[in-house]
Image (spheres, coloured by chain):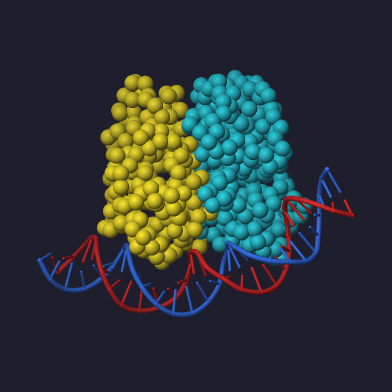
Chain colours: A yellow, B cyan, C red, D blue
DNA sequence: CGACGTTTTGATCGGCTTCAAGCTTTGTGG
DNA sequence: CCACAAAGCTTGAAGCCGATCAAAACGTCG
């Protein structure tokens, strides 16, 4: 199933038919990864590139003191580690958040993809949106107080899921524990908990058994200053 | 002078001679930007891509409350906004830190560059190192306490300058004000000041009239857990 | 010299962390 | 299918890191 990947590459416009054909054909063998298992670790330099086709994963960095920062979440269609096929080694690790299905693209297949100008360009764009996403996170963690910070992350999570057809207008799955949320937002677990309580009390979110919904989504967007422009989705979810 | 840019693109290996020729030829007209002026603002979508050839610039994001987060620094050779030639609009702004010389690459020149597979690939790699840099910042701001956070940034600044021949082994220019440092690290100006004092008192840095030096650089690296791997420099400054 | 931007210092305040313990849900093997 | 363990969530109390406010010293440039 190279489907989510194809859709990802076509976010910014359709690819030539032969290119699409190529992409469909590469989805050779797919691997199942159990929740919480590492997909690839810092320092490694494997021969293939991983592609998430089902489930969720996240990038993280381990720091000297033993603390951990999650720096991105990967959803179906996302490329895990194109880096590795070019750069010398992984500078961070990737773990499965839920049970995950991952396609392993051998190096020569990557090369084949990059030889197609349209695909190569699409990849460049995808990488640039990842970069844009990282910048927004930086602003989020650097400037916003705890409540807005978490609210902002929740809005992003929901919108990203919505854009790949995995969420309704006001509800989505949410497989993160509060511990993940803490490592994502640079806050302590205890404080994350209190913030969530507060959001709940105010009727802004309903979060239970890994299901998240937003009774007043626009209100929440307002509160945390969420603007979707940095996600560069130009379909239904605009600028 | 397309020189710093050429060097940048060749970080990961030399380009074919015709490609190098092309790059040397594109440096059409260069523009001078005064310190503190904006080079490009959020929301804009200009026809050309900016390239820093002299001086320093920085990317920043303005948040609702009026606060500002600096999300990256640009040094000679860095590409400001490839984004724009693909994505719909800038999702952040770029300002000159010092007086800056900027080459404006018109869109068709960019296209010409991307048509060369080797250049296109080099660009992809450069963008990926930018992404890696962003991840490290995220971990830095999210997890490290003020002192380590600032120390880490100083180490990075120095190493980056060193890698482009603008610093000696223990000294470099440092045109940022404490205000910039605050907006970079997500701390208040006052606290940045106190941290700098503390680093000075301990003999770890000497910072005066925009000159920064490191009497005990390895000690400082240790203290903040600085590891250069995320910069993906494979020359003299290893892994 | 005067003015403005930058750095410095002191005092106070508060958001978030840490520690600690109890509770609830999920998962697993007998 | 129950029992128990493990993981996740919740709550309270105390303390600290860094924010904020305010004002003074410094430096740099017209």
On the question of residue B61 being in view, the answer is: yes
Q: Position of residue A177 (x, y in %)?
A: 34, 58
Where is residue B119 shown, x and y percent of the image? 54, 27
The quarter of the image holding the C terminus of chain A is: top left
> Residue A178, relative to residue A131: is it above or below?
below
Question: How many numbered marks does the figure carry?
Answer: 0
What residue appears at the point 46 percent right and 39 percent down from the top-left corner?
A229
| Frontmost residue, A218 versus B175 | A218
Q: Nearer the viewer, residue D6 or A184?
A: A184
Q: Position of residue C13 (x, y in %)?
A: 56, 71
**In the displayed structure, would residue C9 be above or below residue A202?**
below
Q: Where is residue A197 in the image (x, y as percent from the top left)?
A: 36, 63
Viewer-proximal residue among D10 and B132: D10
**Left or right: A81 in relation to B125:** left
| Residue at image coords 27%, 35% | A1
| Residue at image location 51% in from the left, 42% down from the top | B131
């Amino acid at each position: 199933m190279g489907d989510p990947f194809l859709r990802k590459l076509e976010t910014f416009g359709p690819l030539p038919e032969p290119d699409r054909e190529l992409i469909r054909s590469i989805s050779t063998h797919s691997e199942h990864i159990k929740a919480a298992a590492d997909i690839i670790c810092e320092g490694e330099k494997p021969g293939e590139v991983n592609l998430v086709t089902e489930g969720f994963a996240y990038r993280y960095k381990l720091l000297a003191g033993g603390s951990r920062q999650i720096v991105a979440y990967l959803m179906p269609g996302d490329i895990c580690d194109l880096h590795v096929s070019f750069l010398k080694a992984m500078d961070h690790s990737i773990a499965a958040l839920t049970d995950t299905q991952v396609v392993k693209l051998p190096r020569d297949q990557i090369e084949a993809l990059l030889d197609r100008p349209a695909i190569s360009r699409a990849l460049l764009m995808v990488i640039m949106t990842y970069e844009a996403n990282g910048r927004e996170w930086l602003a989020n963690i650097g400037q916003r107080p705890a409540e807005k910070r978490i609210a902002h992350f929740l809005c992003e999570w929901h919108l990203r899921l919505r854009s790949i057809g995995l969420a309704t207008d006001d509800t989505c799955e949410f497989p993160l524990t509060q511990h993940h949320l803490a490592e994502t937002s640079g806050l302590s677990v205890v404080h994350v908990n209190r913030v969530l309580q507060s959001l709940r009390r105010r009727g802004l979110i309903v979060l239970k058994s890994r299901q998240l919904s937003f009774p007043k989504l626009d209100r929440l967007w307002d509160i945390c200053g969420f603007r979707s422009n940095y996600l560069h989705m130009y379909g239904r979810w605009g600028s």
